[in-house]
Amino acid sequence: MRSRKLSLPLLILVTVVTLLFGLWPLNFFPENRVRWLAGQDGIQFYKPRGSSRRAHGGVVYSDAPLDVPTGRQAFEPCTIEIYLESHAGRGGGLTHIVSFHDVYPRSPLIIAQWRNYLTIRSRDNENPAKDTYCEIGLKDGLVPNEKKLITIASGPDRTGIYVNGELARSYDVQSLIGVEHLCGYLNLGNSSIGHNAWMGNLHGLALYDRLLTPEQIGQHYKFWADKPRDMAAVIEPEPLILYTFAERAGASIHNQVANTNHLTIPPAFKALRKEIAVRFWRDTNWDIGLVRDVLVNILGFVPFAYCLLVFLAGGRRLSIRKAAFVTVLAGAALSLIIEITQLALPTRTPSLLDILCNTAGAALAILAFRIVARVRPALRLS
């Protein structure tokens, strides 16, 4: 009798704990971890010491979609210059340094870091669905705590990656990155959904609607290294967009060559968009961290489902088969409630994978219940 009376309070307690576990941390206004560098031009994206790979970090983005002429039919080459210093080392997933977001789920262009690799993903705009990438990269392109100018020069037949004005690697890929990829909102230090936080210092960014020559790229490295006060007046040819991060304070980063395409540092962390990860089998990068998350999502629902099954089956309220069926449905429903609530949490992203894992945890609890039910009589007879 006492066990029956305890089953309902225990179920309520475990349900509350499971909800908090699925929504933690309950922070509706998290800190945007971006700060101006002291005594020099630039901003820093950072995470607290000991934070997990999924910690939200910081984000900077444009006030509106970029005002860049991208509607031309023919391929138009482009060059991108990023003056930076990475603080991330080995481990972790793909972190976005510079990325763009338009109306399609896949970003037009992502310039990111994975371990010490510089990774560049360019969306295939020839594909009607616009859901595939072409990827190139540079091993040891981003060594921690080394200040570098990364130049990506993409023409109709070849794309070159330059480090400090010198060609580091060349790819024979036709029309890999054009001006058409510089569209939508510009994100710095994170992805548009806010789950790819980069750590490091960003000292400058320039976008060009032309293919710079090796001589121009070498000359530009000297400009970035010396960093004259009026960078826009000395750099040639004139870029489409130029950020020198010379403001050193405030919440705005200004384009130095026009009165458009300015950037905002939000006071609280907030991603540009919320994405419900439905096609997880295609859009998810499987690594050790994700496997750990999957196991946590499965095992985290076992206590709730087990207590619910004990409550429903205890006292013959329901048959074991009906109680098991209701338990799986309840597990899926509770998981759905958690995922929907995550839409209001800036640092959490709803995922169909989480719902499936939580439901699998409920099914695992049923298996555990059956094992315990069989073991108990055997222990009493021994």
Image: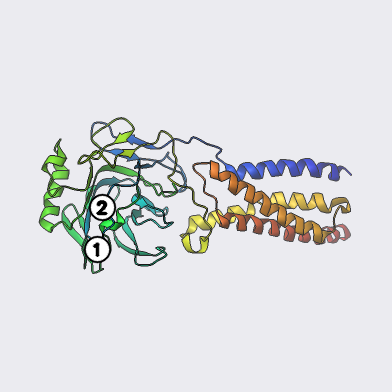
Residue 24 image point, x, y percent: 57, 41
Q: Nearer the viewer, residue 230 or 160?
A: 230
Q: Would residue 52 be seen by someone viewing this image from the given angle? A: yes
Quarter of the picture containing the N terminus is top right
Q: Position of residue 351 (x, y in %)?
A: 55, 54
Using a 10 Å C-alpha cutoff, classify the residue at mark 2 as few (fewer than 14 neighbours), some (14 to 19) or many (20 or more): few
Q: Is residue 170 above or below residue 79?
A: below
Q: Residue at x 21, y 66 (%)?
A: 156
Query: What residue is drawn where x is 58% and y is 54%?
Result: 354
Judged left or right of residue 44, residue 235 is left
Q: Name the side, left or right, on which 76 lies relative to 3.
A: left
Q: Is residue 234 above or below residue 278?
A: above
Left or right: residue 152 versus residue 134 is left
User: Which residue is identified by label 2?
Assistant: 69
Q: Mark 1 — residue?
A: 75
> Could you say which is closer to the camera, residue 22 or residue 108?
108
The quadrant holding residue 255 is: top left
Q: Amino acid at mark 2?
A: Pro
Identify the secondary structure beneath mark 2: loop
Task: State the SS at label 1.
Answer: loop
Give the residue type that dot 1 points to. Phe
Left or right: 349 in relation to 5: left
Q: Tell me where residue 305 appears, x and y as whole percent.
A: 72, 52
